Amino acid sequence: MSKLRSRIAQFVPRKFHPLLKRQVRRFDRLRGHSTAQARPGVILMLHVGRCGSTVLANLLAQNNRVHWDGKLPRKALQLYGDGIREIDYSKWIAEQFTISGDRFYGFEFKILPDQYPAIFGTTTVDFLKACRTMGVTHYILLTRRNTLRHVVSHYASKSRGNWHAGSGEKIQKKEFSLNINDITTGRAPGRALTNYLQEVDAAHAEVRTALTGEKFLELEYERDIDEAGAYHAYTQICTFLGVPTGDVKIRNRRMNPYPLDSVLENYDEVVQTLAGSDFAWMTCDERNAGGSEPDGPRPAG
């Protein structure tokens, strides 16, 4: 079906692609509507990026009890452009759930103020409030203990021009200088590195508080993906949802497995910037560098 749609799109002028995609999504919603009443739930994965979300999303997309719709706000932007601000985003998102039919529906939301909240013109807290009325039933928060490595991974991938890598793909080391006064992973102007790291911590804490009492699973990149392997984190999610793991394959690998001091041209400046702060330890925590990939050990059976 996807190959057929790609062939059709080749014959449609590019300016009409958003309209074509909107019609395709309407068709998919209609197709799943007849069995949507049997849908077991809706999954929302929350994160700030560069924390293993892609490898887990690709695993969930292979599970025949889950329809994974990915980064839905980004799709909305592709379909409507900035006109997305003129529609009721909560109503629009809820309409997408029928696509899954009688399977779990899953999507992602980046939580920093200048990430996906900026697309919908809302805040993460207000978005999570709206999720209750939309019908979201299960929440997953992905965090990264060393958020400095999250920043480095973002800029390394940006400078490389490649955000994801296949499991068998060789990753070329890309050296670059980090502008410690201009850090951003969203739509807002850059801010100081320490301010950004504080913002990430605050965003995670905000989500935990907002989801008190909900069906909630938190996974940490270092512990649950890098050390144990992505399949370990995936099985935790399947247990959380109450679905079998099925036959799935790891399709991604870590994008920046190199020590910070071998990647950052201004590593000493970064160390000096974070010295004396709560984040100073992040510059010398090289436990993850050169270690296992996200497709690490897979449990037998």
Image (tube, rainbow, N blue to C red):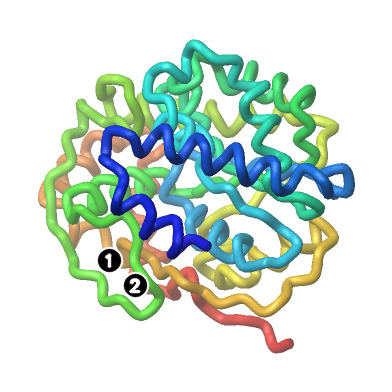
* Residue 2 tag number: none
- Write the residue at 30% across / 62% down: 256
Q: Quick check: can you spot residue 7?
A: yes
Rendered image: mark on residue 258? 1
- Marks 2 and 1, Cα distance to the nearest angstrom? 6 Å
Under circle 1, the secondary element is loop
Identify residue type, mark 1.
Tyr
Count of numbered marks: 2
In the image, residue 187 sits, relative to residue 275, either above or below, namely above
- At mark 2, the secondary structure is loop
Left or right of residue 249: residue 214? right
Residue 163: image location, x then y, percent: 31, 54
Considering only vertical position in the picture, is 288 above or below 266? below
Sequence-wise, the earlier of marks 2 and 1 is 1
Please determine whether, in this image, residue 228 is positioned above or below residue 142. below
- Drawn side of residue 178 relative to residue 84, left or right: left
Relative to residue 252, is residue 218 drawn left or right? Answer: right
Q: Residue furthest top?
A: 86
- Which residue is under mark 2? 290
**Residue at 38 percent of width and 66 percent of height:** 254
- The quarter of the picture where residue 82 lies is top left
Q: Crowding near pointer 1: few (<14 within 10 Å), some, many (20+)?
A: some
The reply to whether callout 2 and callout 1 are in contact (CB within 8 Å) is yes
Query: From the viewer's perspective, is 80 left or right of 224?
Result: left
Closest to the observer, 97 or 256: 97
